[in-house]
Amino acid sequence: MQTPTLFALLLLLILVAYGTGFSRALGAARSRGGIRSLASLPSYYGVHTALWCGLPALIILGLWLVFDDAIIRTLVMGGIVDKPESLSGQNLLYAQIQNMASGNLVGEATPQLTAAAEHLNSLRHGGQWLQTALILILSVGLGAYALLKVSPEMRAREKVEKVLRAILLMCACAAIFTTVGILMSVLFESVRFFQAVPVTEFLFGLHWSPQMALRADQVGSSGAFGAVPLFTGTLMVSAIAMLVAVPVGLMSAIYLAEYAGNRVRAFAKPLIEILAGVPTVVYGFFAALTVAPFVRELAQSVGLEASSESALAAGLVMGVMIIPFVSSLSDDVINAVPQSLRDGALGLGSTKSETVRKVVIPAALPGIVGGVLLAVSRAIGETMIVVMAAGLAANLTANPLESVTTVTVQIVTLLVGDQEFDSPKTLAAFALGLMLFISTLILNFIALHVVKKYREQYD
Amino acid sequence: MTDLTQTQVRERIAARLASRHRKEKLFRGLGIASIAFGVLAVLVLFTDIISKGASAFVQTDIQLQVTYDPAELGIEQVDEESLAWANFDGVIRAALRERFPDVSGRRDKRELYSLVSNGAGFELRERLQNHPELLGKSETLWFNADDDVDTYVKSLSKSEDGFLGRTSEQKAQWILTLRESGELKKRFNTTFFTNGDSREPEQAGIRAALVGSLFTLLVTLVLSFPIGVAAAIYLEEFAPKNRWTDLIEVNINNLAAVPSIVFGLLGLAIFINFFELPRSAPLVGGLVLTLMTLPTIIISSRASLKSVPPSIREAAMGMGASRMQVVLHHVLPLAMPGMLTGAIIGMAQALGETAPLLMIGMVAFIVDVPHGVTDPSTVLPVQIFLWADSPERAFVERTSAAIMVLLAVLITMNTCAVWLRKKLERRW
Amino acid sequence: MTTMTLNAGEAGPAEDQTANPASESAVEQSAVKARAANTNIEVTGTVGSPFCDDAKLSMRNVNVFYGEAQAIHDVSLDIGRNQVVAMIGPSGCGKSTFLRSLNRMNDTIEGCRVEGELTLDGEAIYGPKVDVVPLRARVGMVFQKPNPFPKSIYDNVAYGPKIHGIASRRAELDEIVENSLRRAGLWNEVKDRLDKPGTGLSGGQQQRLCIARAIAVSPEVILMDEPCSALDPIATARIEELIDELRQNYTIAIVTHSMQQAARVSQRTAYFHLGKLVEVNDTETVFTNPEHELTEAYITGRFG
């Protein structure tokens, strides 16, 4: 039976289980004088039976779907005597076997290949049967077991709720699984990368050119993986972005919170927040096609040499993107400063700006710092703007008019397109990903901690 | 103690007043300037994109009198095989030669043929496939002009001479002739909405990307909304105060701030390399975006649950409802509008996301509209990214037009969210 | 940090200072209206002696509006030099609103409008050319809830002199800080920890710090808006002593919820009811022989 059919059948079984569980509970109740005599409502008995019938079967089915390909592959490849050493060679061979098994013959059919293809087909066929049988037996058997247990004394509701609660907990743990998944995916590949390239070279090397030579005897074949130019490039673009975003974001938050009347606020706040909803790819397009030429022309008009993919253009646009982020976080923390402090300062004869600068901002400082750190983490991780506007050349420079490259740009360039999973070039992307993840993690952690402490202070 | 007298104090205060008020004005001015900068940025961004993209919604078309001449086509009857081999381009060329009979020479002829998009042959084939009786007859049809022609014609409305680019003087002459006789017109660009990607700008459309986005969002919504709501319910209503719960919370807050590209790495390493799911598929894209939007949805759902007053819970609990019944029967329905708003905002975020999808190979060149969640596809933002990289000038306006479509969808979604919040929000 | 300052005994009263007095008074006024309706007494004008010869502050026919709602109706009152005037009345009667209009703190509330003639030493408070900055330096204010800035004790007191540029040298500033803290009776308690945060003091000390902060700019008038309502009885007694001492140098207007406090610290007492000034008299008269029956009803505890 095909998996979708099996799935549909399973759903049907679950419905039947609910119905029978429900009516059995009603039947049991009738002989005792109505549903009052049941420990739970009849529908809970139905759900209880349905859960027994469906849940284990669904879990097994899911696991099956995840692992059957891998298991079949191991079995098929295990039967082949002289298989290639490299992973990519094995992949190729297996793809050939798969093609042959599904009838699209590509290339020459050796007897070994034919045998393997037949093996594969028989395994798939057998697997399908095994799957169908296992799932049906499991679901019918457990469903029947649950049905037998239906009795007025059984506390069906408690049991159902326990299962529901467990499901809720699993969903809540999704966040942890995601974090673990991220860590695992970047960590494993990074470890493999660092076996090929020493950590110290990666962290402190000044030269980045990840292109591997095609042949071993080519000149400069090794590729260079010194990531310092990427780090400095990332820092420069982020710094430019923060130079735009922090003053503008903070001042507009202050103006909106302390000065603006209701009408200005109702008009300006949503308008600025539009900036937060614009996709980054749009900013990238804007940076590459409008701002970068503009910056270039401007630089030329004052007699400076500017690259057409300058760090300045990317940084400026990134700054604009982050303005609403800084301003809404600052707005939150500024509004959390109690009015009584403002009253106190104003009551002494401070002007409004003195109140803001000397009382409100110092009081809100931890929160603002936290918000700025979050914004920095955002700037570091921003990808599309720099991919489209910042260029690929790994220059180690302090001139914002030159082209620089960033960690995210390199990750994208290294991973988009054809890739081999065991070349240091591809693995380098994961090592960069690890750096990115760790640095943003630290920033976020500090920022969230600071903001939380700040909130507690005024709660 | 040398006490300052009140008069002395008054004098000193008065002496500094003017400079203090100047500073106040300056500060206020800075605030206004900041707001103005933000508003200006919005305006510049939007006008820039609209001014670049608006022209993509019209397309230059050329009218030709085509003859389905069996000799030219090289076929005798209309069937599948002959259609596949038929020389429709020849028919188009013949029609062009007929319109400009005095063009001779190989170079000039090639120049002439390039007036019309080289997708015109496919249009003819489709036409003949649907109307086999046309074989041997002739009719007048509109065809998309080549992108260079399109660019030139559109630039004519901006300046007298127009932007020639790769267009030769001779070609420009033909174009002007056609335009004067009404055989060349700018018409609404339906191709843009009905086609998939193409190397030829005049044939490139966003349909495939739109459908890809739709599938991807569907997967994201189906997964992230139930999981997000369930997680929020657990954390808000059931979670005991312990280290495990703290860990989950820290994780969620942290994930909300992890760069999106890192989720792409996760998708590549786990979904594609480990689970061997198909590359470029909306399924994988949806999974990655689910993980990415989950924190947003959990956080907004929690806020929405938190806003349900405890008195409701107490009332239901007082009637003897179990904790689960209280939540499912009373709290959840009341919190639903807020959760939906959060979900829409999360979906809008997912719709605009590009970087993680690049990682899982959704950058493929997709001509065909995908039919399912495992078909290779691309999404609108990635299409924009791909077009933005194309050297052809005509792609600039198409990129901007695609951005306009994307922004329109996003604005609609956000407006819906705001409307929903206003409409269903309950104040306790 | 603030949690440290509130001892168990100092837990604030039920009524908190709200960010928006407009809505507060609207709600409470309706409650008071309901209660006053039972007494069925119409307030027509102010009885007693609202005026005095040597007036520091003088108000004539003051009306205050929050948007459409009128919070103060036609109030006329003089506050004499070096005198403590107490303003009492049920909550929501407008006494705080009235107090805040004396140094234009109401300007900070959107939609608030003050009409009438208010003068300080004969100069109009709401004149078109009046600068609120020096005005507020002359008319200081102490709030219901102690609100020290999250700065050191020294910086709290030095804040006013610094922004106004009152001290020309560091030594002068030190002197102003010391004098102010001495006058507020706090010097001996804090002289060894001037660099510690002001928020780390106890509630009563915080309020005295706020008073020190207010007198550091040498004001002529100090407005006090229920300065003891968040304090325990011992701290309250300390503040009340302080008010009595401050009377030598300053003119003080104090809003209070506690009739005993009004009786203890003030020379004259004004009774407000539903935004109207019902009666002004010597404190002794108000509490022993009130002229208006509403005043009598209030001080005998029939409502409030």
Image (cartoon, rainbow, N blue to C red):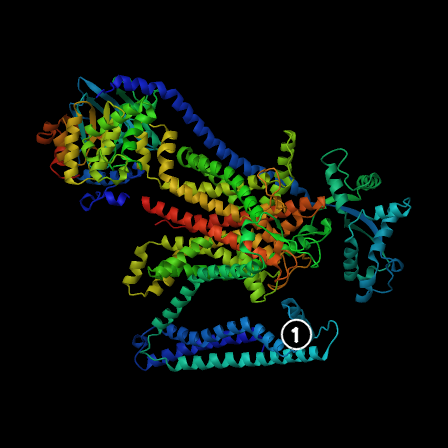
Q: Can residue B407 be seen at all in this image of the molecule?
A: no
Residue drawn at (57%, 44%) of the image: A233
Q: Is residue C202 left or right of residue C130?
A: left
The spot of residue A104 in percent (x, y) is 71, 73
Picture coordinates of residue B6, whole percent (x, y): 25, 19
Q: Disc 1 marks which residue?
A: A83
Name which residue lies at 43% across and 53% down.
B253
Between C201 and B20, the residue placed more toward the observer is C201
Vertical side of C92 occupied by B285: above or below:
below
The front one of C166 and B381 is: C166
Q: Residues within 10 Å of mark 1 (few under 14, many from 20)?
A: few
Q: Chain of mark 1?
A: A
Q: Is residue B31 above or below residue B97?
A: above
Q: How many numbered discs, if any?
A: 1
- Quarter of the picture containing the N terminus of chain B is top left
Quadrant of the rendered structure where residue B371 is? bottom right
- Residue C302 falls left or right of residue B95: left
Query: Residue at 10% across / 31% down in the picture?
Result: C287
- Observer able to see residue C223: yes
Front-most of residues A138 and B317:
A138
Q: Position of residue B221 (x, y in %)?
A: 51, 59
Q: Which amino acid lies under the numbered mark 1 shown in the image of this protein?
A: Lys
Choose between C162 and B421: the one closer to the eye.
Answer: C162
Element marked by disc 1: loop
Q: Is residue B345 left or right of residue C128?
A: right
